Image (cartoon, rainbow, N blue to C red):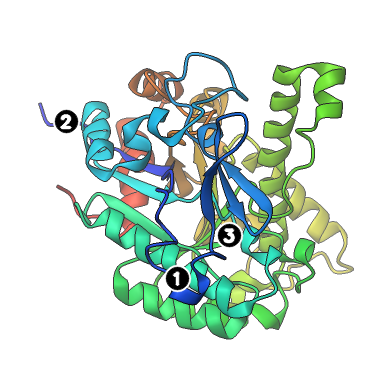
Amino acid sequence: MTPELVIDADTHVTEPADLWSSRAPKKYLDQVPQLVRDKSGRDIWLFGDKTVSVVGMTATAGWPRPFPDGPPTLDECPPAAYDAAARIAHMDDLGVWAQVLYPNVAGFGNQHFLSSDDEELKLVCVRAYNDFLRDFASIDDRRFVTIMATPFWDVDAAVAEIERCASAGHRGVLFTGEPQRFGFPFLGEAHWDPIWSAAQAAQLPIHFHIGGGDPSTSFTPERMRAHGTAATYAYTATELFLKNGLQVADLLTSGVLPRFPDLKFVSVESGIGWVPFVLEAADYAYLEGRPDRTSEWELLPSEYFARQVYACYWFETVAPKRLLAEIPNDRILFETDYPHPTCLFGNVREQIDIGLANATAEQRHKILWANAAELYNIATP
């Protein structure tokens, strides 16, 4: 029997200690992100004097104690989190052919580099990360889909980096779903059109990963004291998922999609259960607010989603089991989120079967393989 083909549309690489120091010009060696061990014995990433990532909190797969506990050092993280050969072995164990790769240190929208005022330093950091990803993927470029970081704060630099990275083999662009949170124009403003144009020309989809906009302020000591760690974690996770739903609604009504009809967007690690409601609400409210109740564009918001927007799911069972008739099946991707705290680990195939218990063979093939294969130009092995 031929093994079922699966593409994992959202995973993360735990960045190695020398990612930036081995690729930065000499004058920036002490300014790029640094991996240091703090007084408590944890490995943390510093950018300037700011802690931007705690290594173990982004590589908890298999860790015996619940989040926010995690491996204190990089050496104690699962090797598949940071080593390409070990990742391939992990994928083989799961029967996953390809994985899409996202960052940790720079933030899920690459926003942490905004804390520097040095424009050249920020670009050095972005380019070093993008070059690292291509090095990581070089073990088997068929199986690793690299999503480039973007210096979105500088449109000209972003266009140049998109063109450079497209030539290098990257297959997607990481962007923030709410640039206005950082003082930049809204998604629909012409300010961003050169970026959309460059990505469309290169056939690289744009990705809104949860947490890529204004970082959540919900996981706070005050909330944990009031409600406990588990409750705070659950609230924060739900907030991030629904925030992506808002970003998708913003995109659908921004005018970007009709202006760039061949450009695709992906809502990453956000789930899909919110999709039917957001599409129905966007259509209803959009038409209600127009005197003649017709679309300003050729299509309705929900129809632009069906044409150009994807969403990823992993732990959900209700949506993939009961709502496939309400979600464009060509726009659903499957992910594991490995090795993050919410990831599927040790139960990947079981969770797939539970969620897709009512799916037809065609629906299952689209969600697990065909949609992502077409989006990222992944060849059948």
| Residue at 41 percent of width and 57 percent of height | 19
> Which numbered marker is on residue 100?
none
Labels 3 and 1: the sequence-earlier one:
3
- Give neighbour class at mark 3: few <14, some 14-19, many 20+ (Cα, 10 Å): many
Q: CA distance from mark 2 to mark 1?
A: 37 Å
Mark 1, residues whose alpha carbon is within 10 Å: few (<14), some, or many (≥20)? many
The numbered disc on residue 110 is 3
Q: Nearer the viewer, residue 174 or 253?
A: 174
Q: Are marks 3 and 1 in contact (CB under 8 Å)?
A: no
| Residue kind at label 2, given as amino acid type | Pro
Q: Residue at x 46, y 64 (%)?
A: 205
Numbered label attached to residue 127: 1
Amino acid carrying label 1: it is Arg
Badge 2: residue crowd in 10 Å (few <14, some 14–19, many ≥20): few
Q: Is residue 73 left or right of residue 225?
A: left
Q: Where is residue 99 shown, x and y percent of the image?
A: 33, 45
Farthest residue, direction top: 64
321 relative to 176 in the view: left or right: left
Q: Are marks 2 and 1 in contact (CB under 8 Å)?
A: no
Nearer the viewer's eye, disc 2 or disc 3?
3
Looking at the image, can residue 63 be seen? yes
Residue that mark 2 sits on: 3
Q: Is residue 375 visible?
A: no
Q: Is residue 71 left or right of residue 376?
A: right
- The location of residue 91, given as percent across then percent down, is 26, 34
